[in-house]
Image (cartoon, rainbow, N blue to C red):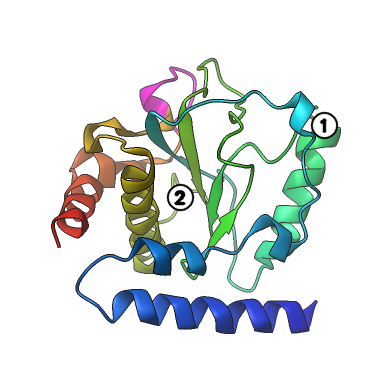
Amino acid sequence: MKKIKLILSISVAICFMSACSSSQFSVNDFERSIITAEQWGSMPAKDSLAKKHDIKWITLHHQGEPFPQGKDPIKYLRNLQSWSRSEKKWIDIPYHYIIDLEGKVYEGRKINYAGDTNTEYDPTGHALIEVVGNFEEVEPNQLQLDAVVNTMTWLTIKYNVPIDSIRGHKDYSKITVCPGKYLYRYLQNKYIHNEVRKRLAR
C-alpha cells in the first residue's frame, strides 16, 4: 500500500507541475494527473447494471463528514465503494470524481454511468464531483478549490458543458445543504465559474 501511494504521489506531482508550468490549461496534462479507479484498487462495476448517460451538467457535492489530515483517501474510496454496494445497492461509488485534501483528483464511477444520490433529484446527465470534508463546518482549502476548478474546466471542454450548467447539489434538491455553505459560496459568488472562464480563455 505504501509503495502504491508513493508512486501515485510522484506521478500526480509530475503531471500537476507540468500542467501548471504553462499559462494555458492542458487537457492532456490534467487527464494524466487523475488517479484512475484501477490505480486506487477499485472493483469495476458491472456494465450491464449501469444506466448510461450523456453529460449536460457539472454538479458539486461534499462528503458531508469530517476528513482529518492524515486520513488515507484510498482507504476512504475503498470503504465508500464497499458501502455503496452493500448498504445502498448501488453499482459503484455515486460520484465520478473525488477530490482529497491535497487537491488530488480520483476517478470514481465511470463518467458514462449515471451517478446516484440519497436525495430526490435525478443525477442522469450530471458529472458528479465530490470534495472530501464537511463544508458546513470547515472551509475548503486552496488546493481543493483549484482542483474543483481544474476538474470543471476539463469537463466543460471534454463534454461541451456550458459554464452556466455548473451548480451545486442543493440547486437540485430541497432536502440537502450539500455541498455545504463554505463551499457553496464559491458557486454563489461565481468564483468557480469565473476561474473556469479564465482557464478557458488562456
Verify CB contact (< 8 Å) between mark 2 and mark 1: no
Q: In the image, what residue type sits under mark 2?
A: Glu
Q: Residue at x 55, y 52 (%)?
A: 98
Q: Which numbered marker is on residue 167?
A: none
**The image quarter in which residue 45 lies:** top right
**Residue depicted at x 50% and y 68%:** 32
Say if the magenta span includes residue 173: yes
Going from the N terminus, do you reach mark 2 or mark 1 first? Answer: 1
x, y percent for residue 141: 38, 65
Q: Residue furthest right?
A: 86
Residue 14 location, x and y as percent? 47, 83
Disc 1: which residue: 87
Q: Horizontal placement of 83 versus 185: left or right?
A: right
On screen, residue 137 versus residue 37, left or right, reads left
For the residues carrying marks 2 and 1, which lies nearer the camera in this image? 1
Q: What kind of residue is marked 1?
A: Glu
Circle 2 is placed at which residue position? 137
Q: Is residue 184 above or below residue 99?
A: above
Q: Residue at x 67, y 84 (%)?
A: 6
Q: Quadrant of the N terminus?
A: bottom right
Find the magenta span and give its range. Answer: 170-177
How packed mark 1 is, by other alpha carbons closer than 10 Å (few <14, some 14-19, many 20 or more), is few
Determine whether 5 is above or below 54 in the image.
below
Q: Nearer the viewer, residue 95 or 33?
A: 33
Vertical position of residue 123 compared to residue 18: above or below: above
- Magenta span includes 184: no
| Residue 25 locus on image (x, y percent) | 27, 65
- Front residue (pair 55, 168): 55
Picture coordinates of residue 42 (x, y %)?
Answer: 76, 54
Q: Is residue 115 visible?
A: yes
